[in-house]
Amino acid sequence: MSTTRKVLYFVVTIGVLLLLNQVFEHGVGDFQIRGYEARIVSLIGIAITLAVSLNLINGLAGQFSLGHAGFMAVGGYSATYVTVYHGQQIAGLIGSSLGEVAGAALVMPISLAVGAIAAAVAGLAVGVPSLRLKGDYLAIVTLGFGEIIRVIILNIPAVGGATGFTNTTPIANFFWIFAMAILTIVIVANIRSSTFGRALSAIREDEIAAEAMGINTTRYKVLAFVISAALAGVAGGLSGQLFANPLNPQNLNFVKSIEVIVMIVLGGIGSITGAVFGAATITILPEALRDVDRQFPGLRMVIYSLLLILLMIFRPQGLLGRKEFSVNWFRRRKAPLAPASTGGGADV
Amino acid sequence: MSDASAATAVLKVDAMTKRFGGLTAVRELSMDVPPGALYGLIGPNGAGKTTIFNLLTGVYTPTEGSIHFKGTDVAGRKPYEITKLGVARTFQNIRLFGDMTVLENVMTAHHIRSRQVLLDAVVGTPRHRHEERETRDRAMELLKIFDLDGVANEGATSLPYGNQRRLEIARALATEPSLLLLDEPAAGMNPQESIDLMKLIGWLRDEFKLTILLVEHNMKVVMGICERIQVIDYGKCIALGTPDEIQKNPAVIEAYLGGA
């Protein structure tokens, strides 16, 4: 893709997001999006960021991390802290306030950047010692990390402790949520299709062979872990600044980490499209089943779990497997790229 | 090939010993591999040949002794550092990246020679595009040499066994080595495939200016292409010489067939 085309895509994406944001907040004519639906759409966007970022470390690099909620918490609390305690000051720099569009538009990226950096540092601190571990052991260490973070937050009164970080100004809107979701998808997709993505896949497939092919496995595992954590931090920052959705340590326990894992497993581990699809499904499904719950209380979670069990029985590779959505699906199928063997090769 | 002096040896191993607890897998082994050599390493099962490979490529660290590759001490270095210096290997039990295509397997191995940094990939800079194209082209060239270009987009483990072995060699070559270690390249191949492989190995040595160190059980292959052969038994060198000398050596015959 040429640079001009890239700039064009960028501008168009921003434009479309701003337009949708307008529709989302104010509606078009009689068409209004209700608060309930708006909230679900926002949560889907955040879930996409979470799932796609987790897919980098769990799906691509094959390192089973159970600490995504922990990174989300670190990033979320840091970002929200910036907005709550310094938001007005930052907005004041351009003569605005948090309540105004300009002020919020300045504070949001700054708070998200702080959240991403904080989560990345946490990722580095956890990753360096624990990525020497494999499989179940890594899962246990990351699980433990998530719980440690949760307990620490519970004991910090400045961020609300057990009651949650409630005194925030909700500045995370449709635009930011989906801009970050798209950014995450682009970053992960670009890494995947590069030499770094191949290095990570190689680590997943065979660490000894990867090392023998010159790949510094520890370095790349840590790198993937840190990027994944940073993006989870962004998702946390968005989540904490969403309307009537305060960060609460109770919602950021290991159950949240497992929920994100369910998203990528459901969609097909390793597939970015699958992660997006899984994120949307897992966010919508419990809501869609709410009516059922009204008639038969408690049945909702039974159906939810049954659906997941059935999926794992009949489609263990996830809904999409490793496939990716591509515009080529809509074009006519071309003949495979590779030409027939010419029988050349070594003249031996 | 005449004996090259120790100073110009590509690989020089000096009194290397490896102990695993009470077991001495390699005992005071010395090797001198001159540039451009086709050097064979043979010995009965369990003699320690693969352990020697693992020591040379940094999977294990020698308990004692030294390994010099082109004058650099590599004993105890990490495998990826040694690969970067120009040592590549294949594995006795094939270790391809199973869930990746044939082409991706080879492209992956070119990673250390790629000049792009992570940010290039994330942003998609011209350098990234250029490097990716170059990596792909090189990988395709290598696949052509091994007659695998027709199956470039197939899954690596879907290939027949013999082709998987050839793909491992192609992948090793993508790291742009000067010393290639082949661990039983002819294992599992039929006689015709073995003969083709022998020719290919000789051709690769000349074409890529390689030094090749070979572990092999197939005596026809070893005797047919190696210029120098070192025989290992119980981790010790018991003989060193040309194929003819080795075949007549009583110690070698005893190691393989047992004492009379």
Image: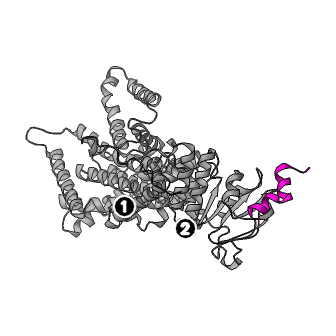
Residue lying furthest top? A295
Tell me the residue that label 1 is attached to.
B133
Residue A140 visible to the viewer: no
Q: Reply yes or no: does residue B250 show up in magenta.
A: yes
Identify the magenta region.
Answer: B241-260
Secondary element at tag 1: helix
* Precedes in sequence: disc 1 or disc 2: 2
Mark 2: amino acid:
Lys
Q: Reply yes or no: does residue A248 show up in magenta.
A: no
Q: Is most of the magenta stretch helix, strand or loop?
A: helix
Residue A64: x percent and y percent? 51, 47
- The colour scheme applied to this rendered structure is one colour
Q: Residue at x 21, y 60 (%)?
A: A5
Task: Please state, as top left, top right, bottom left or bottom right, where the C terminus of chain A lies in the image.
Answer: bottom right
Mark 1: amino acid:
Arg
Residue nearest the observer in this picture, A208 or B215:
B215
Q: Residue at x 71, y 77 (%)?
A: B6
